[in-house]
Image: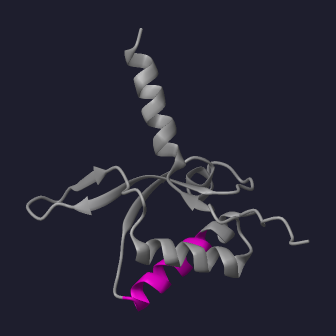
Amino acid sequence: MPNPPRLLEHRADIEQALRRVGELLAARGASYAIVIVGGAALNLLGIVARSTRDVDVLAFATRSRTRRAWRLDAPPDPLPEPLAAAIRTVGRDMGLAETWLNTEVVTYVRSRRGARGSG
């Protein structure tokens, strides 16, 4: 019987997983800027110190060509294949859940936004 997926126990685990995704992408000549929220983001900011099973991606960030600003867009569904492949590889190598980096929070935010507007 396979072992259950490992949690991201500490800030260092989250940093390592994200860094490894970045390294795999760089080796393929790809890069993405993501905006994360939730427990993983709070861990990285040093606000909390607790384990988490995933990293929630709320948006992709794109630097404006004309201004020094970033534009935020909902992440594509499905994620771009180079990113999805890097996520799978890191998850497998670190023993994490297949969905350790996901965009499920976007569905939640959209449903909450819709619930507020229907009253």
The answer to whether residue 103 is magenta is: no
**Vertically, is 49 above or below 4?**
above
Question: Horizontally, is 96 left or right of 26 in the view?
Answer: right
Please tell me which residue is depicted at 47% across the width and 30% down the height of the picture: 111
Q: Quadrant of the C terminus?
A: top left
Q: Name the image quarter holding the N terminus.
A: bottom right
Farthest left residue? 66
Between residue 58 and residue 2, name the one nearer to us.
2
Question: In the image, is residue 37 above or below residue 98?
Answer: above
Which residue is farthest top? 119
Observer able to see residue 15: yes
For the record, the magenta segment spans 15-28
Q: Position of residue 110 (x, y in %)?
A: 43, 34
Hey, which quadrant is residue 6 in on the image? bottom right
Image spot of residue 52 (x, y percent): 70, 55
Q: Nearer the viewer, residue 73 or 44?
A: 73
Does the stretch in magenta take in 20?
Answer: yes
Residue 17 location, quadrant: bottom right
Whether residue 46 can be seen here: no
What is the residue that sits farthest to the right in this orientation? Answer: 1
Considering depth in this image, is 117 or 46 the residue closer to the camera? Answer: 117
Horizontal side of residue 99 vs 66, given as left or right: right
User: What residue is rendered at 46% in x and 20% in y?
Assistant: 115
**x and y percent of residue 15 in the render?**
59, 70
Magenta residues: mostly which secondary structure?
helix
Determine whether 54 is above or below 105 in the image: below
Residue at image position (24%, 53%) is 71
Residue closer to the observer: 99 or 19: 99
Q: Position of residue 5 (x, y in %)?
A: 78, 65
Q: What residue appears at the point 43 percent right and 82 percent down from the top-left corner?
A: 25
